[in-house]
Amino acid sequence: MNVNFLLDHYRVYPKHNKITNENKVTILEPKIIQVLCFMVHHQGEVLSREYIADNLWPDTIVGLEVITRAIFELRKVLNDDAKNPKYIETIARKGYCFIGKAEPINKAKSQAYLPSLLLVKLGHKSAILTALLLTIITFFLLISPIALFKNFQISNTKPENYQATILSDGIENIQSAALSADGSKVLYIQTDAKSNESVLILKDVKSHKYSILQKGTEMYRSVIWTEKNNIGYFIQCNTSECKINKLFVDTGKLQVVYKTNKRLKTIKLSAKGKTLALTAINKHRLSISLLSLDSQREVPIKLDNKASNYAATFNNIEPAIFYVQQKDSHSTINSYNLVSQHSRIISTKFSKVTSLHSEDDANLLIAGQIDSLYSVWRFNLNTNEISQALSIPTNTHAYELVSSQSSQLLFYLKKSSNINIGAQGLANHIDLKQVNSYANDLNAIWSRPTNTLYFVSQRTGSYELWSHNRHKNTKLTGIQADSIRRPILNEKKNQLAFVAAKNNQLKLMIYDIATGQLTVNQNIDKEVHLLSWSTKGNSIYMSIASENIYDIWQFNIVSKESKKILLAAGLIAEEQEDKSFIFGDIKSQKLMVKKANGTMSIIKDFKGVALQFRPHSIKINNNSDHLYYVEQKPTSIQVMSTPLGVMVQETPKELFTLTTNDFITDIGRHGKDYVIYDHFVSKTSQLLLLQAVD
């Protein structure tokens, strides 16, 4: 259904992926418009998510969450209340039904509007003048486009629809991949889980036949092609150094072109094939340098050394590179001129950027997030206009973006994950099957007095704060965040504080449970981990990264001011009723208590313990007589309990054993000891090649 139509005062233009309402214009993903048109075409019918997906995209693998998110976005644009719908009704356990009235936009009325408008503007001028003006207008409408084609070069339109070919089975753990210039072959690196070896593989796109080119115990990273279809490069690292190998694909021969003690992450090749852009880990951040393949001389690019700079890709026509700069959760897309050595920001709209690709002279492809929507976007370098090039399913990210053959082919490494909330020791209080959804659910904490689980979920398409109580899930916020960190409860259990990222801005928020309102919505500039509330509930203790690794700050809720109170401290910060303060001294690896008079003493010495270095991995139990902590083992993590007190010499007790893919968010006691954690249900990676279709 490609006919323009009306939904009351909304005008829907399917070919343009556009819905207008008075002076507001909303551009939607193609899939969202397709779902709307399909439902309108089947007005009054109950359609399951499976039926919609199978009919709209029969030859493409599409998760059902795409339909759910499309319905959510349509309701938002059409201001349609799910509880009292005007357009889309949810039928429990069956699907959706379009109940609105759609009418085609009457073209005859639209055309008849032009003369009447002219007559109003002309007032009492003669009909001859009116006819003359209409003749001129007709000339420009019908004849001028012909002249325009002769005098101006019309830019090629980009494809809007693609058909996907899956080049891997989803079981392989793929780290990096690249499509050859002619689109016929793929080089990719996978990790063999059984042998823990890296494997470099060549696959033919048409036949799907593959051959193993290299295999070894050292880490392989970042495979790329040259313009020639028989030469590539990749990184090979051991514990002491990394080297860049030149690969002759036909023979499998390797030639080492560069060695460094830097921890290289990625490489990108310039258009002329003479320079590599290297991204490496430098003091826990990512930095970019340039390597001349002729002279083998590496030159660092002078960028903000307090930020991570990554995803370097060469400009096709200028001596410049594009890159992403991330600092305190703020992301910008930048251009660095190699001649003037000057950097400039070209966009601040993107967050969670995972890949850049210089598509042609005028466009940059960006895999990233805008307004909570993650997609592959096309950024016009001349106009700064942004359009969606490819929709990406929820819980999925695109890496190693490549386009070829005038954008008729798109290739990327698709990585998907699903995170569920896990718990042990709370089986009598929580039904995890009711809590978890098909989307990411994480960062849960338990409120013992109210028997309530508070958690973060992506099930509506963006991240919100939720609660689970008496077998019922309730959405608490409507902030449409890009991410929400672990919340913390105050002593009275009536306020939740949390940090959310939205549109490249970090915010400290406080949610009042009784009123259901946000009482604090404060912009913050640095990445923080909230640790605890003060006993009076008028301030919050937080951990902020610094040159001391982490420092503890105190944020006053009333004045909205922050102050640094402890250096090289983090993981735990608890204010006691007697005004003493318990904290973790990171440098000495000791749990300390600071008395009201300023004196300090050691509670627990963690030297010799492989302590997991994460906030909330240390916690004092409800009775303040035992300490919980998390110990990192080679193949697992263990939740331990040890008595508090100088005279007590009891051996630490192992409470729970979890996998290395579990991330603990809460430890406590409710009748018996419990632990709550994020659990990766699935991690998949696939190679996708998309062919443009009409």
Image: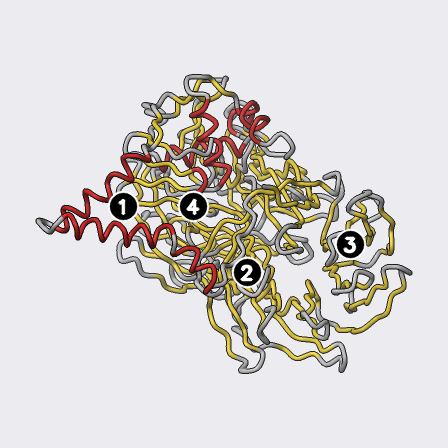
The amino acid type found where label 2 is placed reads Leu
Residue linked to disc 1:
23
Q: Earlier in the sequence, mark 1 or mark 3?
A: 1
Q: What is the crowding at mark 1: few (fewer than 14 residues within 10 Å), some, or many (at least 20)?
A: few
Distance from disc 2 to disc 3, alpha carbons, whole Å, reads 23 Å
- Choose mark 2 or mark 3, whichever is in front: 2
Q: What is the crowding at mark 2: few (fewer than 14 residues within 10 Å), some, or many (at least 20)?
A: many
Residue linked to disc 2:
364
Distance from disc 4 to disc 1, alpha carbons, whole Å, reads 26 Å
The amino acid type found where label 3 is placed reads Leu
Q: Kindly indicate whether the residue at mark 2 contacts the one at mark 4 (C-beta within 8 angstroms).
A: no
Distance from disc 4 to disc 2, alpha carbons, whole Å, reads 25 Å
Residue linked to disc 3:
187
- Secondary structure beneath disc 4? loop
The amino acid type found where label 1 is placed reads Asn
> For the point 47% across and 36% down, which residue is it?
32
> For the point 37% across and 50% down, which residue is it?
142
